[in-house]
Image: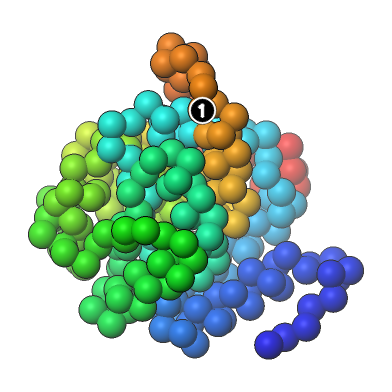
């Protein structure tokens, strides 16, 4: 294990990096996941490594969508599983959502390792192994879903998504909540709710909002959803990147 002094100015960032490294060693994260993390870090640095106000609003809208949903599902890949497994389990509990593993670099072994890892972190049932459903319009491994999971979900949380699947899920008329530090990425652009924030901050933030809104009336939740403007959120994030925070 490594020792990072908490006083280090880049403590959080180094800790996150270390989690991804361990994820690769355990066979949870793909080697491409290291590159994806590097890309994310660059944007996070430009955002001031903070949750900007527009990302917090997006997290609240995401929580409202999840509470209104009939069948919400949180999709997990190798980066998410390594970075915030407990936080994913807490989000699923707070919003009564299913958890499903869905991988770009899918192998049976990696699927099983991630399912086991999530269960070790408190998940009850983890979907994704059955893979008896398909997302039409994509030809790679990410098309494989569980028919009773993402296949029949009305709201899906898709963190660190590739643009292809994000677009295809949109075609299926699912409400998509995307977490991506790059406001210009294709997935952020097609999302119903793009949360431009680091996954390690965004997931607990959505959970916090969901707990806060637990007792809210349906029309209050519907107002939060209707008042959220995705284009405005993306513009705010781009502005924040240019100015180093909002
Ligand atoms: O585990 P697998 O096999 O499903 O593979 C997952 C990765 C992430 C390797 C795969 O989906 C991939 O290659 O993704 P991309 O195309 O590199 O896109 C990742 C996006 O997530 C980029 O836009 C990054 O800016 C963003 N990103 C990376 N790390 C974080 C992040 N966004 C939020 N929080 C992060 N920690």
Residue shown at 73% from the left, 65% from the top: 12
Residue shown at 18% from the left, 42% from the top: 152
Res 236 seen here? no
Residue 166 at x, y percent in the picture: 31, 48
Res 145 seen here? yes
Given residues 102 and 149, the one toward you in this image is 149
Residue 206 at x, y percent in the picture: 54, 40
Looking at the image, the residue that sits furthest to the right is 7
Residue 98 at x, y percent in the picture: 33, 49
Quarter residue 111 falls in: bottom left
Given residues 124 and 187, the one toward you in this image is 124
Q: How many marks?
A: 1
Q: Which residue is mark 1?
A: 214
Residue shown at 12% from the left, 55% from the top: 133
Residue shown at 28% from the left, 82% from the top: 109
Does 31 sit left or right of 41 as displayed? left
| Viewport quadrant of the N terminus | bottom right
């Amino acid at each position: 294990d490594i020792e990072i002094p908490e006083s280090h100015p880049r403590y959080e960032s180094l800790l996150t990096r270390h989690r991804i490294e361990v994820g690769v060693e355990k066979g949870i994260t793909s080697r491409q996941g290291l590159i994806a993390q590097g890309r994310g870090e660059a944007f996070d640095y430009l955002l001031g490594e903070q949750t900007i106000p527009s990302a917090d609003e997006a997290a609240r809208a995401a929580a409202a969508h999840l509470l209104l949903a009939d069948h919400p599902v949180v999709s997990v890949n190798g980066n998410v599983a390594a970075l915030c497994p407990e936080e994913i389990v807490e989000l699923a509990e707070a919003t009564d959502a299913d958890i499903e593993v869905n991988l770009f670099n899918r192998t049976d072994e990696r699927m099983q390792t991630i399912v086991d890892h999530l269960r070790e972190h408190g998940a009850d049932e983890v979907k994704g192994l059955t893979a008896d459903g398909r997302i039409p319009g994509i030809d790679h491994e990410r098309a494989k879903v569980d028919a009773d999971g993402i296949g029949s979900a009305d709201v899906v949380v898709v963190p660190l998504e590739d643009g292809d699947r994000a677009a295809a899920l949109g075609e299926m008329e699912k409400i998509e909540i995307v977490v991506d530090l790059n406001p210009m990425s294709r997935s952020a652009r097609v999302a119903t709710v793009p949360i431009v924030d680091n996954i390690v901050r965004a997931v607990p933030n959505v959970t916090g909002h969901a707990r806060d809104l637990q007792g809210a009336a349906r029309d209050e939740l519907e107002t939060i959803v209707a008042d959220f403007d995705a284009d405005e959120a993306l513009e705010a994030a781009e502005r924040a990147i240019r100015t180093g925070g909002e």
